[in-house]
Image (cartoon, rainbow, N blue to C red):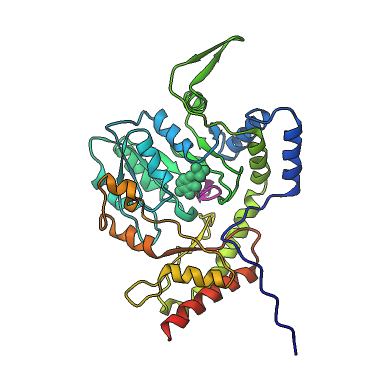
Amino acid sequence: MTAPAAPLPFLPLTRPTIDDETIAGVAEVLRSGWITSGPQVKAFEAKLSEYFGGRPVRVFNSGTCTMEVALRIAGVGPGDEVITTPLSWVATSNVILEVGAKPVFVDIDPVTRNLDLNLIEAAITPATRAIIPVDLAGLPVDRDRLYAIAKKHRLRVVEDAAQSFGSLWRGRPIGASGDFVSFSFHPNKNITSIEGGCLVLNDDREAKLAEQYRLQGVVRTGFDGIEVEVLGGKFNLTDVAARVGLGQLAHLDEFTARRRELARAYFERLDTPAVRALGLGLPVADFETSNWHMFQVVLPAGPGALKRAEVMARLQAAGIGSGVHYPAIHLYALYRRLGWKDGDFPRAEETCRNILTLPLFPAMTHADVARVADALVSILQAHSQP
Ligand SMILES: *Cc1c(COP(=O)(O)O)cnc(C)c1O
């Protein structure tokens, strides 16, 4: 008789990889006597700027305030409209409300799951000032078409690239070109500073304004004076966080390569006639531009289909985490109160009801991917062949 196999450890949806060098670096910062914004922030900004081909970059304490600040620099406010997608983290449209402007959602392309660029021009009105596209799961929105539309209609763009750090467009990093580009360093993102984010800007004037909006609008004048001209927030990143970000940035290429490799392994298991027959929707098989921030499937829908919550519960029982990214923004209570309702964006709603994020992070193994894929397939098969 053989002993029963020990249960496999729980596999979370995601987990950051922090090396010992970074941990030692954090300890050094903590002992240095300067722990809030200082030399580490400057060093992190310099490295990021280098990565983005020399464009000005400022770091912040989230990838939400970065977008709010970009909108403020662009002068977007009450009476203005900003076009965006209903399939994103709610931060994307909350920042539009935060500056007093009106979100204008356009439906998604169900293949890319990003906003459908074909629908943008019909949504533009004389009040439209900006577009906030989102690269869901790291798959870039078509930047050539996006900027052609923005240029034609003289619109600003605030790229919500929270999920696409390390993704490419025409062989260059997302952020190396474009208008405002915002990234998040939340622990679930491809690189982290615990909490944090950065904003890529166009010139020194915008960078100076970004610094003011980041810290109470303050500018220093001489040795003993300060002046306040704009209403700023409290959005500065600490040196401790910046040191974590620096340690992460050094591993970016390795993290991205590993995520791509694991995504390929998911395709090997799931992109088969037998799995396709179950009605499982797969992401775009993009191994050139995407950083594979997430691996998201769309579960089979319809009256007889297994409910997503049930699939998640069965995965959980098998020791596997999963997640929903995201419910449709326009159907949250806050947004319903502002007038949106079921049926406004049918393709986003359909995808949001059935989308499921599977575990994908650099420390995962190929055996982990096989375990997740096999568990999902057997859950779906058991239901389709009762
Ligand atoms: C994570 C995320 C944000 C917000 O980033 P925070 O750093 O958590 O504020 C915004 N938009 C998208 C698409 C995100 O995934």
Residue 251 x %, y %: 66, 49
Residue depicted at 53% across the width and 46% down the height: 172
Residue 285 x %, y %: 48, 64
Judging depth in this view, the residue of 120 and 375 nearest the camera is: 375
| Count of numbered marks | 0
Whether residue 232 is situated above or below residue 356 in the rendered picture: above
Within the image, what quadrant is residue 77 found in?
A: top left
Q: Residue furthest bottom?
A: 1
Q: Is residue 171 magenta?
A: yes
Residue 249 x %, y %: 64, 44
Residue depicted at 47% across the width and 40% down the height: 64
Q: Which residues are magenta?
A: 164-173
Locate the C terminus by quadrant.
bottom left
**In this view of the protein, can residue 103 be seen by the observer?**
yes
Locate the N terminus by quadrant.
bottom right
Q: Is residue 345 magenta?
A: no
